[in-house]
Amino acid sequence: MKLFSPTASPQEQDISRAKSFRGLPLRLVLILPFVLQIVGAVGLVGYFSFKNGQQAVNALVDRLMDKSGNLVSEHLTGYLDTPQKINQINHDAVALGLLDLKDFKTTGRYFWKQLQTYPELAYSAYTLTTGEYAGAGRFLAGRGVTIDELSAATDWRTYTYATDERGNRTQIAVVYDDYNPQTEAWYQDAVKAGKPVWSSVANWDGENLAGYISITATSPIYNNKNQLFGVIGVDLLLVGINDFLKQLKLTPSAKVFVIERDGLLIASSSTEKPFTLVNGIAKRLSALDINDAQIRATAKYLKHNFGNFQRIKGEQKLSFKLQDELQFVRVVPWQDGFGLNWLVVTTIPESDFMGQIHANNRTTFFLCFLTLLVAIWLGLLTSRWISQPILRLSKASAAIAQGDLNQQVDVKKILEIGVLSRSFNEMAQQLQASFANLARINQELDRKNQEVVRINEQLDKANQELATANDELELRVEKRTVELQHAKTAAELANRAKSEFLANMSHELRTPLNAILGFSQLMNREPSLTDRQQESLRIINRSGEHLLSLVNDVLDLAKIESGKMTLYPTDFDLYVLLDSIKEMLALRAESKGLQLTIERSNNLPQYIKTDDKKLRQVLINLLGNAIKFTSVGSVTLGVELAGDRQPIANNQQLITLHFEVADTGAGIAPTEINSVFEAFVQTETGKQSQQGTGLGLPITKSFVELMGGKITVNSELGKGTVFQFNIQALESDVSKAVEQKRTYRVVGIQPNQQKYRILVVDDRWENRQLLLKLLQPIGFQVKEAVNGQEAIKIWQQWQPHLIWMDMRMPVMNGYDATQQIKSHLQGQATAIIALTASTLEEEKAIVLSAGCDDFVRKPFHEEVIFDKMAQFLGVRYIYEEICSKNISEASTVDKLTAEALAVMSNEWLMNLSEAAALIDEEQIAQLVSQIPEEYQALAQSIQKEVSEFNFDRIMNFAQTAANL
């Protein structure tokens, strides 16, 4: 319907002006501000994220570099301090007259003992100005520690002696005719310097240590007239520094290396060794020539930057680029008071730190860009949603302005625009009545539009905050996940390394012990042995059993941190345990003028059941510390029954024992009392004594808690210390506590039995010979195999009744061989018993799961072998009584006392004291032969002390008897 025709009215003129104006589109107006805000926010977030990442990397690099420098410096100080201390100890022993450098036999054994105590040392020796020379070292393959001597007694030739397990010379291994120790650099350097110094780093050419480099700590010795008497030196292998650097795990690509001022490598964390072998001789590498590109490039950069390594003064923080990658470098000079001047260099690539930061930045930029795209798309969608109805309304308005009122606009998506459309429709129908309301409707529309804009802004802000919070949460979750994964991986690697170390250590120590103990048992079967030979065999057997006990103790201690330590309760005599500990420590206490007392309460049970080895270790640790740190007064151990007996199952009674160790020593400061049970922590008094490792009390605490108790300490500085602890045990009786030993042994197989075929499988010849010589004289048919593959071949051809199977062998191990044999139907009838040197319980489960019928650990006793064969084959043996002559005789020997020695003359006693001081077993034997027949018990007691190397007790008792 047309109400009027278009004329040049004022309204038409306004519309015409609006058409002529080319303004911004509504969509652009709605989207542009929103997009600009998003772009600005994304840019600021990316910039600050990048800057914060760089600052964090620089701070982390500084901390890691400081940690690396401190760790390496501390290790160098500790590792290289040992030879100098040993030289000082030897020098003091010579100055005090405790070590006679003219007594080459004693000094050789003394140096042998030092090398047993310090395995990192390669050689320890001295040379006199007369050209005489003595020392001990590891340089002959398969010989262990040997003793060298060059003197008139050796016709001025260098004799190298093989030694036994006590350091005694057994035979001449090698003779050198033209060796002159005075031409060695370590001798000439010490004479020239006139004080303790280090020699230059040298290549080691021993058979045992070919391919190693070492450094010698050398010191001149002067007599009372300040004249040069000789030079003493200790060789230290530098491989220990190399191993320590490889253990440092700063970052995945970090490298740490130590060089001399001429650039030659001392050690590095690289897998490449600091030397090359040329015709079996180690030739040292320069850091400029090493194959490791990172170390070589760092060394070249330092030389180019400073001219040479000598010009590097003080700690240096540097950086350079290697293949367009930034490398952080820290150089720390390290020196000691004996002439060493090295550089410790740490280099870390920036990529070790920036990789995760770059990944996070890329993720951040991607999410921000995605957010920007989503925001633009939402803005376009929103603008389109709003602009299309408005555009339709605009066209309808233009038509109405031109007088065409037949316009119907139907909008339902947006409430406000729908109201506007209805208003327009009503305006078309009632134009004359609606002009006045048109302005009001327009105002309402403007207000509604502003509200829509405000709501949209609030919605956009809420969406932005939600996106930011979501990004932060994802970053935190991702970071925590990575940290947990790294921690888990590190823990698994540490546990796996520890388990492998324990298994290898057990196997390597127990395998030779198996041969020692086994062949001593075989030799004891010989009826032609003399009493002295039988006593020697018993000494070998006791020493081997003692060494086996020490090995087991060391392995037990290693299980404490892994939580695998368990109790092994036995029935034993508590009184005898306390008396043996007192007897063990009495001489140490007497030598310091201390009174050692053990007080037992009247109600203390004599026989109990608990882990006697751990209880013994706890008491020895506490009493040994008390004696060590007490100069005047006494050390007292009190033991009593705490509380009442508690009945439990099987008519047993649970008891609580209370122990108290009190001394009158230096005491512990209040500031240190809370840390005495921490590992590797020593009190100030302990540090001054320069003894111990700080492990005794932590181990003691672990053992006490394992036995169901708790340990406490009270101390007053200058007055003494009291340690108290309780343990739980079961009350026992004499029938259980006294060990029952077999009085018979197997000598043959009863008649009317089949011929039993036994196969022995072991890669070590001595282990096979042990079982062959044990079983063949009894009547078994025995064959041997050196590996699993050979064992399978013999089994197929010979069909043995039983196989003794070693589990670790070359070519094919015992596990694979057992599985192949047991996979056959005939193999099910063959008994296979594993023989292994492992002590891990997990190993037993693995062996049995492989198909073995039983499990025996090396070293073993012969009765265990025979019992297992009787169990699986039903063998019936012939036995004979074990001769107890020597045992009964030994039991009648009284303990050596000063009163018992008083029956001899003073001259004889002084000769005995002198022979004991010189550890001269031959002279002591001659003196013992002079004892009258009626005092043979005294002779036997002296021989017993000699066999146990108690020369100090013999000397003290002889001197005391001479003064009676």
Image (cartoon, helix red, strand yellow):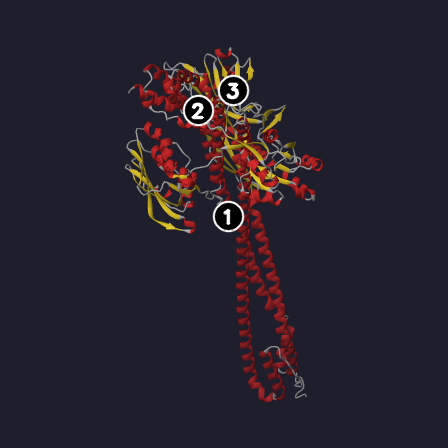
Q: Quadrant of the N terminus?
A: bottom right
Mark number for residue 725? Answer: none
Q: How many C-alpha atoms fall within 10 Å of the one at disc 1: few (<14), some, or many (≥20)?
A: few
Q: How many C-alpha atoms fall within 10 Å of the one at disc 3: few (<14), some, or many (≥20)?
A: few
Residue 769 picture quarter: top right
Q: Quadrant of the C terminus?
A: top left
Q: Amino acid at mark 1?
A: Ala
Q: Earlier in the sequence, mark 1 or mark 3?
A: 1
Q: Is residue 312 something one can see in this rendering?
A: no
Q: Position of residue 67 (x, y in %)?
A: 48, 40
Q: Earlier in the sequence, mark 3 or mark 2?
A: 3
Q: Is residue 720 left or right of residue 704?
A: left
Q: Which residue in the protein does label 1 denote? A: 56
Q: Amino acid at mark 2?
A: Ser
Q: Amino acid at mark 3?
A: Thr
For the residues labelled 3 and 2, the Cα–Cα distance comes to: 17 Å
Q: Position of residue 346 (x, y in %)?
A: 52, 37
Residue 954 picture quarter: top left
For the residues labelled 1 and 3, the Cα–Cα distance comes to: 65 Å
What element does badge 2 sit on? helix
Q: Which residue in the protein does label 2 denote? A: 947
Q: Earlier in the sequence, mark 1 or mark 2?
A: 1
Residue at 48% x, 12% y is 153
Q: Is residue 714 above or below residue 634?
A: below
Q: How many C-alpha atoms fall within 10 Å of the one at disc 2: few (<14), some, or many (≥20)?
A: some
Q: Position of residue 373 (x, y in %)?
A: 62, 62
What element does badge 1 sit on? helix
Q: Which residue in the protein does label 3 denote? A: 170
Of circles 3 and 2, which is in front?
2
Residue 851 picture quarter: top right
What element does badge 3 sit on? strand
Q: Position of residue 340 (x, y in %)?
A: 47, 27
